[in-house]
Amino acid sequence: MYRRILVANRGEIALRIIRACREMGVQTVAVYSEADRGARYLDLADERICIGAAPAAESYLNIPRIISAAEIADVDGVHPGYGFLAENPHFAEICESCNISFIGPTAATIRAMGDKVEARNIARACKVPVVPGSEGAVESETVAQEIARKIGYPVMIKAAAGGGGRGMRVAHNDISLVKCLIAARGEAEAAFKNSALYIEKFIEQPRHIEIQILADRFGNVLQLGERDCTIQRRHQKLIEESPSPAIGKNVRNELGEAAIRLCKNVEYFGVGTVEFLVDKNQKYYFIEMNTRVQVEHPVTEFVTGIDILKEQMRTTSGERLRLRQKDIKFEGCAIECRVNAEDPGFGFKPSPGKITSFIVPGGPGVRVDTHAYSGYTISSYYDSLVAKLIVHRRTRREAIATMRRALEEFTVEGIKTNIPLHQQIFGHTKFLRGDFDTGFIENVMALE
């Protein structure tokens, strides 16, 4: 087990890592930017090091400064959290070259699964269904049109190195395909320094289902069930729940088995998530793998009783899994809402600023993961996530009732949040019935 680690992230995930380490007897060194100076969560770390100015490029994305901090602090591991450098294979390589463990899979695995084209090829080799599309990156508009005509419109254009909905466009004909290629290529280059694109058949009215994976360095892989992440805005997840209200037992088992095959093929270890689209006929297709801890990991922690952060620390440090698949039990229903600093009434415009009042809900079955508090300032430099509100009850109906009560209790003043939108969703008949797809926000909520 690690002796002392550097937390190469900020906000609620940094706090989550620090808390897990404290319970395990592992010392933590928290890095922070000038914008985060004075944040209360930093006081819980054993040591704090400023790594630069507010812009992420000068701090949380600045590899030389993070490595320097790690060496000065004499750590034996670096935890990247999610976002920033969490899926950067170059960062993982540098950590290892400096004899500092990267708390995640190998750089080769991150590189392979981070390239959407290569990941699709790996999935095919494992007999995991993929969405019909191009065999590799699309080099020209002519080739793109030929592929689109073959698989049939509409098609989805995706950045090979993409994530978070960036570099994605839907084209319905040859003309829109050309326009979408130009726009997606520019966005991909700006976001990922990689303009490569590929094309997939656009699955209409899909559910977004992901499988949580836990694996050790000895070839043992467990699947910890699914999370339904279908409620999204512009490909950004808003609500996650487990179990999914839309898939049957057979599909659930097949998704878990497919995720395990994929992970064994790439000799995966640590925690990760294999993501699928499931169409209205219950056919499923692999879309990508996230080689890190997910924002929504508390959902799985609730239904399995497994501390995912602690297991990530154990498995990446070289310990064997203590559990077998038959030991994994799923209890009840868990749902998570992402509370963001944004104004749904004005196109989800970001709402940075000082929080003047912050009162979190409580009571049976309620968990709030947050680094915010009254007097805390939400910076315009980083992600708008303020808190994660998670509930766990015996049934989905009970979980929804608890979530509605918790949302009413949640008070955030001084900035705008999407809490009112969540309240609308949890009162919508289609959501209550589990009758929704990834277009729910744009195609259903926007019309009401």
Image: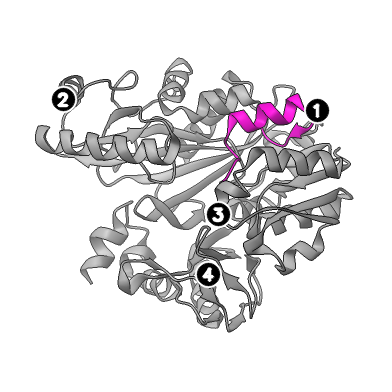
225 or 382: nearer the eye? 382
Q: Is residue 94 left or right of residue 417?
A: right
318 or 161: nearer the eye? 161
Q: Is residue 291 left or right of residue 199?
A: right
Residue at x 45% of width, y 51% of height: 229
Q: Quarter of the image for the C terminus: give it.
A: bottom left
First-in-chain label (1 vs 2): 1
Q: Amino acid at mark 2?
A: Gln
Q: Which residue is mark 3?
A: 55
Secondary structure, mark 1, is loop
Verify whether residue 89 appears in magenta. yes
Q: Which residue is mark 4?
A: 398
First-in-chain label (1 vs 4): 1
- Disc 3 versus disc 2: nearer the observer: 3
125 or 147: nearer the eye? 147
First-in-chain label (3 vs 2): 3
* Mark 1, other Cα within 10 Å: few <14 / some 14–19 / many ≥20: few
